[in-house]
Structures are given as structure tokens and as C-alpha cells.
Amino acid sequence: MKVQIDPGRCQGHGRCYDLAPSLFGEDDEGYGQVVGDGVVPPGEEPAARLAVANCPERAIDLVEEA
């Protein structure tokens, strides 16, 4: 599973990095950004789903890998 943020939809509310700081950080203007390559480590899936569910703009996508 990977996470990604659509920068065109992100409005900088910061819920992603508040809820899942191991997966998301913030840029210099407070917009969310994915940490590293976006791969969700084992055990962090619930945090990734929580961040997705709490993004007001639905700017975070989960990509399920086969």
C-alpha cells in the first residue's frame, strides 16, 4: 500500500501529518507531503486510512499494490 497527496486538492489543513506523522510531513507553507516514497510500513495501515478519512478535500489517495 502507498499513500499519495494530490497537491491540487490539498488546502493545508494538516490533518494528515497530525494523525499520521510517520507517513506525512508538511512543506514550508504548511501543505501536506508524503514522507519518503509513500510506502506504508506494516502496522501503519490504520493510520493511513485515518488520514485519508479525515482529509476535508479528499486529497490523499491510497494505492493498493497487488
Image (cartoon, rainbow, N blue to C red):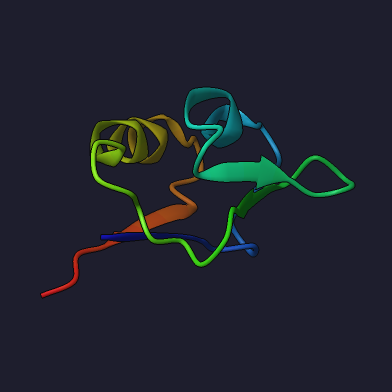
Task: Where is residue 5? Give x, y as percent.
Answer: 53, 59
Q: Residue furthest bottom?
A: 66
Q: Residue at x 46, y 61 (%)?
A: 38
Q: Residue furthest front?
A: 42
Q: Quadrant of residue 3?
A: bottom left
Number of marks present in the image shown:
0
Left or right: 27 in relation to 62: right
| Screen quadrant of the N terminus | bottom left
Q: Relative to 36, does residue 28 appear above or below in the rendering?
A: above
Left or right: 6 in relation to 31: left
| Screen quadrant of the C terminus | bottom left
Closer-to-camera residue (1/7): 1
Task: Where is residue 56? Give x, y as percent.
Answer: 49, 35
Closer-to-camera residue (25/8): 25
Left or right: 31 in relation to 7: right
Task: Where is residue 42? Give x, y as percent.
Answer: 24, 45
Q: Residue at x 52, y 37 (%)?
A: 22
Q: Relative to 4, does residue 33 appear above or below in the rendering?
A: above
Closer-to-camera residue (57/63): 63
Q: Residue furthest top?
A: 18
Q: Residue at x 87, y 45 (%)?
A: 29
Q: Relative to 55, does residue 58 appear above or below in the rendering?
A: below
Q: Residue at x 57, y 44 (%)?
A: 24
Q: Residue furthest right?
A: 28
Task: Where is residue 63? Give x, y as percent.
Answer: 28, 65
